[in-house]
Image (cartoon, rainbow, N blue to C red):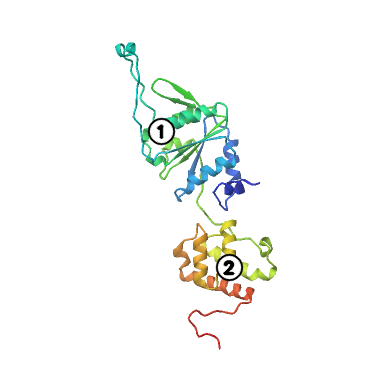
């Protein structure tokens, strides 16, 4: 099964096949931790990509931290002996949620493949990005009184940010673009179990998707095709179906005058294929 299909099973569907990018990341000869910077403008789609990739690659451990979530420290209860009261020692500062995630990922990586997903890095303190850069380069996470090390053979860092990463951190990362984008529509009627008599419809759809910027994903097209077979009979209904099921199609593009003729062509081809009579909404009823 391809990586694209595996990732779709875990909630991330795309026309892009990320096999090459993943292979390039793991084949690279580097002396620092492998670090994947997930890029794109589609917000939480990047988060969905990171989770689906980790699941598709069957990582036993996935540690996740979101910098945009507020810290919620609980009450700290410290029990000390009478001797400790007489000779107090400086207490270690409590670890932040971020530091706990790093320490946990390092511990898991000692014996098993582990992904550490650090999301919404734009909300992190800039000093955390600097520390993270040092961690990637040295494999070591230093704390006030101790340090932990990551196993570079097992640990993969995945970084997600809505703003550019700290320059030095970006330089040690392999970038991947995850926005939904269309690819040429190459499906033929026989690919979805239809006869060649539907060729004119598929040609009209190919012209429409090309003008809109690319084809829907397989599951998106399956839903659109089902609408075409059972629901869509007008250009406006086709607009609703395309916008309703396709992630990358812009609503304004569907309303553009240049698209109207292509929508009409699809509806005409559909009517001819189905052998349906044109229904005029609001017209006089037949005698």
Q: Which disc, if any, is residue 49? A: none
Q: Residue at x 48, y 45 (%)?
A: 47
Mark 2 and mark 1 in contact (Cβ < 8 Å)? no
Residue drawn at point x = 55 percent, y = 70 percent? 232
Q: Position of residue 124 (x, y in %)?
A: 38, 37
Residue 30 location (% of width, % of height): 55, 31
- Depth check: give the residue in front, 196 or 71: 71
**Corner quadrant of residue 214:** bottom right
Q: SS at mark 2?
A: helix
State whether residue 161 is above or below residue 130: below
At label 1, counting other C-alpha atoms closer than 10 Å, the crowd grade (few under 14, some 14-19, many 20 or more) is some
Left or right: residue 194 versus residue 79 is: right
Q: Is the C terminus in the top left, top right, bottom left or bottom right quadrant? A: bottom right
Residue drawn where x is 42% and y is 37% of the image = 167
Q: CA distance from mark 1 to mark 2?
A: 49 Å
Residue at image point 33% right, 18% down = 90
Q: Which residue in the structure is indicated by mark 1? A: 97
In depth, the one of 241 and 134 nearer the eye is 241
Q: Nearer the viewer, residue 63 or 37?
A: 63
Disc with the residue nearer the chain's start (1 vs 2): 1
Mark 2 lies on residue: 228
Mark 1 lies on a secondary structure that is: helix
Query: Eyeballing the image, is 162 above or below 143?
Result: below
Is residue 217 rendered to the left or right of residue 82? right
């Amino acid at each position: 099964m391809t990586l694209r299909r595996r990732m779709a099973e875990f909630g991330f569907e795309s026309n892009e096949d990320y096999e090459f990018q993943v292979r390039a990341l793991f084949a690279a000869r580097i002396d620092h931790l492998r670090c994947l910077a997930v890029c794109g403008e589609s917000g939480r789609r990047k988060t969905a990509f990171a989770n689906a990739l980790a699941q598709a690659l069957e990582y036993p451990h996935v540690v996740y931290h979101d910098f945009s979530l507020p810290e919620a420290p609980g009450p700290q209860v410290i029990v000390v002996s009478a001797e400790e009261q007489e000779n107090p020692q400086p207490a270690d500062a409590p670890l932040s949620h971020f530091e706990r995630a790093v320490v946990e990922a390092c511990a898991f990586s000692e014996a098993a493949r582990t992904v550490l997903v650090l999301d919404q890095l734009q909300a992190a303190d800039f000093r955390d990005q600097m520390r993270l850069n040092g961690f990637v380069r040295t494999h070591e996470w230093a704390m006030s009184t101790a340090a932990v090390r990551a196993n570079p053979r097992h640990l993969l860092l995945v970084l997600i940010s809505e703003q550019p990463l700290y320059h030095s951190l970006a330089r040690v990362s392999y970038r991947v673009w995850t926005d939904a984008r269309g690819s040429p529509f190459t499906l033929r009627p026989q690919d979805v179990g239809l006869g060649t008599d539907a060729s004119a419809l598929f040609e009209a759809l190919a012209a429409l998707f090309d003008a809109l910027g690319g084809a829907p994903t397989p599951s998106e097209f399956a839903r659109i095709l089902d609408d075409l077979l059972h629901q869509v009979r007008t250009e406006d209904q086709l607009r609703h179906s395309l916008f309703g099921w396709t992630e990358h199609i812009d609503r304004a593009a569907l309303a553009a005058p240049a698209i109207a003729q292509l929508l009409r062509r699809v509806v005409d081809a559909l009517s001819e294929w189905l052998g349906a009579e044109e229904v005029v909404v609001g017209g006089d009823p037949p005698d």
